[in-house]
DNA sequence: GACCGTAACACTAACGGTTAGCTTTTCGAA
DNA sequence: TTCGAAAAGCTAACCGTTAGTGTTACGGTC
């Protein structure tokens, strides 16, 4: 899909990958806080400034693969079947994401994140941005015209569901439980004004 | 209320206050990111180490008054009238907190917080801790025996309601809107098992 | 009132993340 | 081949934060 984009970009991508791999390896070997940036750079055989040219911060080295999270959530809203209700679509996507990050191989990375305050803080900050994007996507859908506050609220709830389910003892059951709550919360929001005919009720659950 | 607790503690409190006042003044004058710790310490005429003996971090200088937030939320749960439903009690408290931080004088401080990434990140991290405390308080109430996941979820929702309402164009209306959603979410959670007699329904809305 | 333990504060020096400024290398295209 | 620009490098610093080590001022005790 991205085969021959010139040697330059290949080298750049290779450098980036080497930095990310080295960093993750060192972090898992000896702990995130115990490994310094200068050390990662030395081990990857690049200058510190080069490292920061590829990654905005030390935390970004860890959350590298996690970049499509935001896009997947937004696509779950925008690319869903016509007239498909919003919440089940989001529930499916969140369930997939939770499954993905509670899979076998991912455990060490998430343990590292959960035990480092800096990483947890960074993750929560990311999630907040994701919630804002999700809220925008929901607000932009003409099928479900809710207030800006309702959109932002439900978006946060969905992100909360992800965070909590990921940490729960039984992640899939937690997705069930939280999304029942989200569904109920969404169903009490109503489009501010619908078409004049259609006086009351029976228009619920978009 | 705290008049004669010895000269020592008075001096300590005075130092702390002087640091906080100086910091807030400089931050508001020239911007949070443009003022360094060494500068605050110099202006307050204390050593940098002294500053950090009173405040855990630079961000803590800003969120000084905000310390009772956590306790107020927990008390709204634990100190409410017997058999008073949970959600309205939390709604009252959140409304009071939102009113307090959207009052006239508080505007510049919140503007500063909203425009500094470091401060926003720090606040969100605080709120998360507060949500955990709130979840614990809710889980500890025998009147409302919900699953751990339900407690944590509803606690996060409440914190979200605070954050979103604080930023909303009409904060009080936003509290109304978000808490309608929270109420609905709470009402679909049910105590795992009640006393054997009382087979179905009519036990809702604690 | 003299005495001692300790809390508060100061000073220096460093550490780790991050960035600015500037030079060198490496590729792509003309 | 040559030239412009992207990529990478080096140095040197800035900033928040902490450890280590004193020094002072207070509070309780004899």
Image: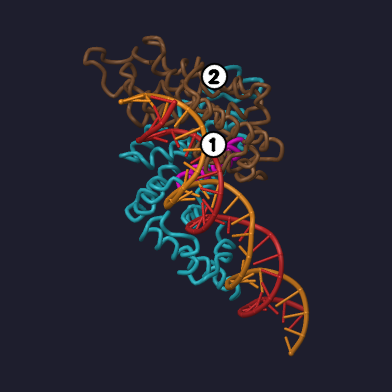
Chain colours: A cyan, B brown, C red, D orange
Percent across and percent down for residue A106 are 37, 53
Q: Which quadrant of the view contains residue B39?
A: top right
Percent across and percent down for residue A42 are 48, 69
Examine the rendered structure and indicate whether residue A70 appears above or below residue A10: above
Examine the rendered structure and indicate whether residue A173 appears above or below residue B11: below
Examine the rendered structure and indicate whether residue B163 appears above or below residue D20: above
Quick one: quadrant of the C terminus of chain B? top left
Q: Residue furthest top?
A: B82
Q: Residues within 10 Å of mark 1 (few under 14, many from 20)?
A: some
Q: Helix or strand or loop: what does disc 2 sit on?
A: loop
Which residue lies under the disc numbered 2? A201
Q: Is residue A81 visible?
A: no
Q: How many marks?
A: 2
Residue pictured at 41% horizontal, 13% vertical: B80
Q: Helix or strand or loop: what does disc 1 sit on?
A: helix
Percent across and percent down for residue C12 are 54, 54
Report the front residue among B65 and B89. Answer: B65
Percent across and percent down for residue B52 are 52, 41
Host chain of mark 1: B
Q: Residues within 10 Å of mark 2 (few under 14, many from 20)?
A: few
| Cα separation between marks 2 and 1 | 49 Å
Point out which mark residue B60 bears: 1
Q: Could you tell me if the residues under marks 2 and 1 are in contact, i.e. CB atoms within 8 Å?
A: no
- The answer to whether residue A132 is magenta is yes
Q: Which quadrant of the view contains residue C10?
A: top right
Where does the magenta region start and end?
A119-139
Report the front residue among B162 and A93. Answer: B162
Report the front residue among A9 and D21. Answer: D21
Q: Residue furthest left?
A: B196
């Amino acid at each position: 899909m991205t085969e021959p984009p010139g040697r330059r970009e290949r080298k750049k991508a290779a450098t980036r990958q080497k930095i990310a791999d080295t960093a993750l390896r060192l972090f898992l070997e000896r702990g995130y806080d115990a490994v310094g940036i200068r050390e990662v750079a030395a081990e990857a055989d690049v200058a510190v400034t080069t490292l920061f040219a590829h990654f905005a911060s030390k935390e970004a080295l860890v959350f590298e693969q996690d970049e499509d999270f935001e896009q997947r959530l937004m696509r779950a809203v925008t690319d869903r079947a016509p007239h498909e209700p919003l919440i089940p679509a989001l529930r499916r996507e969140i369930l997939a994401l939770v499954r993905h990050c509670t899979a076998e191989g991912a455990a060490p990375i998430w343990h590292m994140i959960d035990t480092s305050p800096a990483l947890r803080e960074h993750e929560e900050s990311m999630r907040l941005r994701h919630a804002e994007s999700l809220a925008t996507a929901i607000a932009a859908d003409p099928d479900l015209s809710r207030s800006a506050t309702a959109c932002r609220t439900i978006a946060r709830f969905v992100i909360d569901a992800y965070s909590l389910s990921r940490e729960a003892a039984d992640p899939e059951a937690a997705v069930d439980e939280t999304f029942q709550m989200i569904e109920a919360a969404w169903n009490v929001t109503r489009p501010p004004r619908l078409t004049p005919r259609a006086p009351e009720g029976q228009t619920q659950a978009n």
